[in-house]
Amino acid sequence: MDTFFLAASLEGPMLDLVDIGKRSLSAYRGIAPDEQLDEILHLAERLRGARCLHLNATPYGGGVSEILRSGVPLLNDLGLVAEWQIIRGDDAFFQITKRLHNALQGAPGGFSESDKATYLAHSQLNASHLSDDYDFITVHDPQPAALPMLRGRRGARWLWRCHIDTSHPNPEAWEFIRPFLPAYDAAIFTMAEFIPPHFPLSRVSIHPPAIDPLSPKNLPLPEDLARHVLEWTGVRLSRPLVTQISRFDPWKDPLGVIAAYRRVRAHVPELQLALVGSLALDDPEGWDIYREIRDATAGDNLIHIFTNLVGVGNIEVNAFQSLSNVVIQKSIREGFGLVVSEALWKGTPVVAGRAGGIPLQMPEGTGGLLVDGVEECAKAVLHLLQRPDEAHHLGERGREHVRQHFLVTRMLRDHLRLLDALAHEKPLEPRSLALTSQPSAAP
């Protein structure tokens, strides 16, 4: 696409600032481990006034946006000056970045010279609208990956946060994205196993993502409210319920979930299945998967399908995760799968694919059962439905595992450790800033 016409079609500022609320680290006392909170305060004191930007492609509809909605306000509470901005692009750009996202996880397919030119043209326009006024810029996933190479570092320390499993990328996709990465000072992966071959950066940190126990999705709901919410959606709590909550994405294998559910229903005739999916700005493929799911479940009134576009939001998801007998996350490929920790935080047992970061959340005897394939998934779900005491104990052990390892405070501590190390190597310039008030995490 000609750059002149592209610029004309995307008039106005390219980067959208996301509105965020206020959060207080002190609110996590009594929920998160004290040692995590204490270290966060110590690290933040050395970084007070540092200006931080997080860049990604969508303000809602996935784990990255949920992480940023909690993490960025907490950085501000700690005395850093943090913002979250969204890159912009047209449909052609997001079609390409979705294929790139899948290909970096190993999906087949190539990229034409026109595809590459479109990606670079959008990236150049986004880079041209980026301010110089930051000490740290964290770029999330492949959509904005080219920005530091196209714009130059200009005094900032750039971090590339890859949330997906790139251990065996499509060679053509990796050949395209790899030349952008030397412009970064550091990279962050969920697991060491996700680092792609011949990675060009020497500084690599491993930071699994985490959930916010104080977000609307994870706050404890009174049981009568949760029951009312699900009854309102059409679910009947007099019947058993299994649920999968995820993007409508082929890697989440929703059709495999439906097949496993139908095997279980042969033994539990009144079993209900809820598929609760999100549709995001940067994921045009999601609509195609949604239509496939509708076609596969047509006429089955025990299968309930919901999206974030028809009035099902965080409170409804919270209720589904709290009151389902079993939560399923039958991922084939997975970056981490935050929905697993969300369900475990509510004490609900999980049956999940043995993929990506899911086994980190569900070590042996904790949280639920790991499976490979439709048949194993069906057997595991039936096993837990028929053994509610075992399911309860697995869920309770899963909740404590999440408390220790997968709450937002641990992730925040990891991020501050990396910023502190980068600032030590290249000291921050003194700045005259209007700092936020002193944070407090005191008991």
Image (cartoon, rainbow, N blue to C red):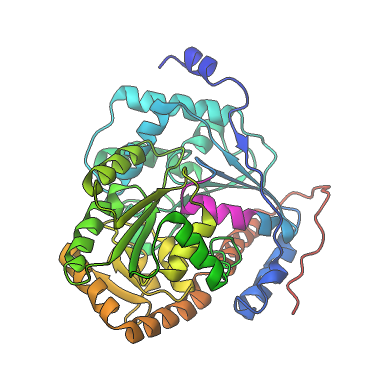
Tell me if residue 374 can be seen.
Answer: yes
Query: Which image quadrant is residue 386 in?
Result: bottom left
Residue at screen point 37% across, 64% down: 357
Of the 4 image quadrants, the one containing the C terminus is bottom right
Image position, residue 190 (x, y; %): 42, 61
Query: Which image quadrant is residue 258 in?
Result: bottom left
Image position, residue 268 (x, y; %): 22, 71
Tell me if residue 206 can be seen.
Answer: no
Left or right of 32 in this view: 367: left
Residue at screen point 35% across, 62% down: 243
Residue at screen point 47% across, 42% down: 309
Q: In the image, which residues are magenta?
A: 60-72
User: Is residue 69 on the magenta stretch?
Assistant: yes
Q: 234 or 76: which is nearer to us?
A: 234
**Count of numbered labels shown in the rendering:** 0
Dominant secondary-structure state across the stretch colored magenta: helix
Left or right of 408 in this view: 235: left
User: Is residue 197 on the magenta stretch?
Assistant: no
